[in-house]
Image (cartoon, grey):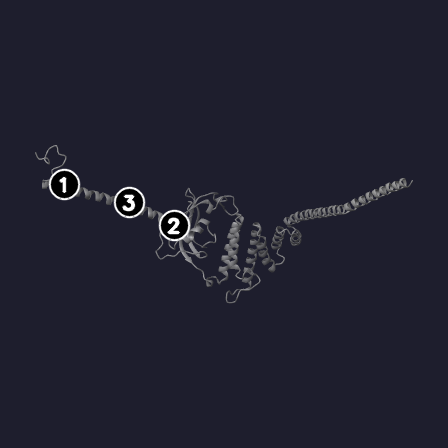
Amino acid sequence: MDTEKSSSSSFEDLTNAEDTKDLRKATAEAAFEATEKTSATSTLVGDTDKGEEAESESECDILGNKQLIKRIIKKAPEDAKSPSRGELVTISFTGKLEDGKVVEEEKNFQCHVGDYEVAQGLDMILPMLKVGEVAEVVVDPRFGYGTLGLKKDNDGDFIVPPNALLTYEIELLDSKYEEFADLKTFEVIRKYGTRKKERANYFFKRLEYNTAIHLYRRALDYLDTRDGDPESEYDKEDLQLSNSEMQAILDDRLIVYNNMAMTQIKISAFDAALKSVENVLRCQPNNPKALYRKGRILEGKNDTQGAIKLFQKVATLEPENRGVQQDLARLFIKARRDQHNEKEMYQKMLGQAKKMEKKTAAREKQPLVENSKLKLLGYLMGSILIGVAGVAIYRYKY
């Protein structure tokens, strides 16, 4: 019996050529189907990865904490540029609350990058946009209008409620670096200076003093290009201004210095505030606000008498100013208290000095007393010895 052809054999009979051909064909078909499935799976995974990459490219978590998110709605042309800090940009944007209510809308709005002329979140996004790009920006309250929200002027109604999440759709229409030639007109420099000043006033009212100081300085960049000296004049090659225009710029500049001094006082930057207010007083020695703020600065530097003199001058210039009268009364009380405390301090110092003198005198007298006691004891012992010797001699003779 042939073992290979036995029915009990565990091996298959592969000697038939046709059977072998069919088996190879079946194997090839199975392999082809497996390859097709693998290819389809790879294509699906690849498409998924590309979709995730596209989504990742279109959405960007700027800070990594979901507080400022940018999503690209419309891409900019490949050769488009992004604005740099300080450049003038033209934008159109719409801001909405979570319920879809529109709370901000501007068309062809111009502002300088980094000058907080829009919500902080939008200002941070501007350098990341390209001209022609349209993006959606989700702004956390921290980079929007915070816990204070945004109110209408002289009205208690909120435009943006406190702690509101804002979603903006913004389009960057243009970006321009301004040469000095672009700023050589009275209208432009005054417009920019006034805009920075008003924005600084807005942040001062919100108690955001550092941002306000930054914007006051930016206002001076346009209104004052002479290193903080308001008495110097523009060079003829720089600007040609009439006397009335020069006076208008000077008035705006002094207002900015005055406001900046007050803001610096709020953060106890007294030396910087003193420089700001001196710029005003050099041009207007009797400016009541400048004098008053200088008095506040001197008070902050613990020069009470100097502050009183300035407040008295302000009270003379503005006799109906009750606030100055109250400050004067408060400073007089403080001066008396300081004088009393100083007197007590001197008395204590003198009392301690007298006590020290007495102790020193007592220490100096103590050795004299001890010496006198020793001398008296010596005299007494000598007298006793002399008496004893005399008695002994008398008995010896008689």
Q: Which residue is mark 3?
A: 45
Farthest residue, direction left:
1
Q: In the image, 311: left or right of 116?
A: right
Seen at 27% across and 44% down, the residue is 44
Amino acid type shown at disc 3? Val
Report the residue marked by disc 2: 135
Given this view, does label 3 or label 2 mark the residue nearer the observer?
A: 3
Mark 1 or mark 2: whose residue is earlier in sequence = 1
Residue identified by numbered label 1: 23
Task: Give 297 or 13, whichever is nearer the viewer.
Answer: 13
Which residue is at 14% across, 41% downward? Answer: 23
Percent x, y for residue 260?
A: 55, 54
Q: CA distance from mark 1 to mark 2?
A: 61 Å
Mark 3 to mark 2: distance in Å? 28 Å
Residue 378 visible, this orientation:
yes
Element class at badge 3:
helix
Say which of marks 1 and 3 sits in front: 1
From the image, which quarter does the N terminus lie in?
Answer: top left
Rendered image quadrant of residue 378:
top right
Q: Percent x, y for residue 178?
A: 45, 60
Of the residues under marks 3 and 2, which one precedes in the sequence? Answer: 3
User: At label 2, which amino acid type do we have?
Assistant: Ala
Assign a secondary structure to mark 1.
helix
Q: Position of residue 278 (x, y in %)?
A: 60, 57
Q: What is the residue that sits farthest to the front in this orientation?
A: 397
Dot 2: within a 10 Å radius of its alpha carbon, few (fewer than 14), some, or many (20 or more) residues? many
